[in-house]
Amino acid sequence: MPVDAATRQASTREDSDPPVTYAPPTLGTRGGTSNDQLRRYNLSMVMTMLHHAGGCSRAELTRRTGLNRSTIAALVAELVELGMAFEVEPESVVGRVGRPSPQVVPNPGLAAIAVNPDIDAITVGLVGLGGEVIRRIRFDTTRVPTVAEAINAVKAIVDGMRGEIDQSYSIAGVGVAVPALVNSADGRVLIAPHLGWRDANLARDLARVLDYPVFAGNDASLGAIAESMFGAARGINDLVYLNGSASGIGGGLIIGGSPLRGTSGYAGELGHTLVNSQGVRCHCGRIGCLETEVSMGRLLAVLGLPRADQDELDIALGVSRDPAVLAEVRRQIELLSEAISNFVNMFDPEMVVLGGFLGSLLSVGREQLTAAMIVRSMSSIGHTVAIERASLGSRLMMVGAAELAFAGLLDDPAGFVRGRAGRR
């Protein structure tokens, strides 16, 4: 992702914080004069702030970047000319002295298509610059879709949205959040065990049928980025994110303000942490992995439900007084706390965020989960780490996937517009 730690921290800095001067870390790595490179960096920084904050006043941009007012005015004017932002008059504040600074907001007409295939559904969304989910369509599947079936379903959904898209939006690209090991460089799915996909050129094949650039990544890693930019972990530099879905449990890590990817981009397979040596054999070959012992399938089985979205699961768990359901919930929370305490000890995060059905478990068993985690963690760490539910809810994967599509735009706004014009 194009957002470095300094930029991310700036986008969440409180108004009372002192100004910070940013030095571009990669000057000289692109063509053009040093002034061109500096301007490109500053334009990227301001556009990224606007996107992740949903808008800022000129005064806020000046304060957060440490740039002077005339420089900010010039950068904002360029973004407006590029069609990526616009200015609106701020609401007047009673008792405030002086004319308030104009509000600069990202253009929501610039949008990304977001895709999240899973074993029980294929979800497609339209996400505007600024992180707003404009449209979200969930297509329930009767069986686990093949790669070809998933591509056909996405094409059908997008074709149904073409009228709205052509009339009101300009598409930056398509981002795909997949429960899989994904080569982020080319969007190739190496293996998606629950989907049964292996060595699939998903991004390439989707790009051919949609006629948009397509980027793919691991769903949990993208969920971690989404929550850190727009959700419960906003402003948190060290984060462990766990997502529970029908296809299992994945994880994402934000360390020092940046996503932890590992050498090949596959870091964060936290669902395969051992939690029960006497448990069920996992598809990975191990016994007692977190995702085999803590699973949505087991919860649905005791609830007697064939399937449920997050809201339905919340309701079902919240009202159930069935001893079998309560026992299964306690069992899963106990094992989940075992895994979380390990992650707390390993990564020393400020916060642990739980998404999907794991968020439902937290809602009904926060006290049990927190108490068990504190007992198992090093006391100095376990008492300070916060455990929160992902706040983006059903929008999470849409927002995370969209970040992939917006990456090039945020990294070089002017270059993105020039490149698009050149392809016409």
Image (cartoon, grey):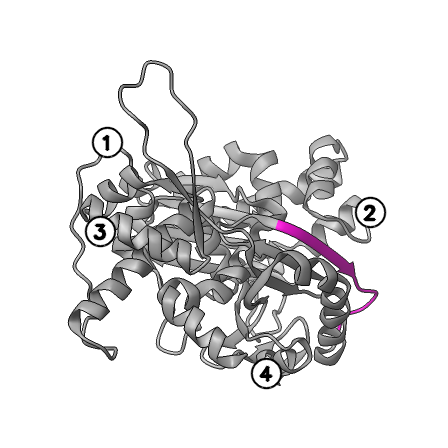
Q: Position of residue 93 (x, y in %)?
A: 38, 20
Check contact, mark 3 vs mark 4: CB within 8 A. Answer: no
Q: Amino acid at mark 3?
A: Thr
Q: Residues within 10 Å of mark 2 (few under 14, many from 20)?
A: few
Residue at image position (68%, 73%) is 195
Question: Visible in this render: residue 111?
Answer: yes
| Tag 3 residue | 71
Disc 3 and disc 4: Cα gap in Å? 40 Å
Q: Amino acid at mark 2?
A: Gly
Instruction: For mark 2, give the secondary structure.
Output: loop
Q: Earlier in the sequence, mark 3 or mark 4?
A: 3
Q: Amino acid at mark 4?
A: Arg
Residue at image position (34%, 52%) is 77
Q: Is residue 389 left or right of residue 144?
A: left
Q: Residue furthest top?
A: 95
Figure check: 76 above or below 372: below
Q: Is residue 4 left or right of residue 215?
A: left
Q: Residues within 10 Å of mark 1 (few under 14, many from 20)?
A: few
Mark nearest the camera among 2 and 3 is: 3
Q: Earlier in the sequence, mark 1 or mark 4?
A: 1
Check contact, mark 2 vs mark 4: CB within 8 A. Answer: no
Which is more toward the observer, 109 or 332?
109
| Tag 2 residue | 304
Disc 1 and disc 4: Cα gap in Å? 46 Å
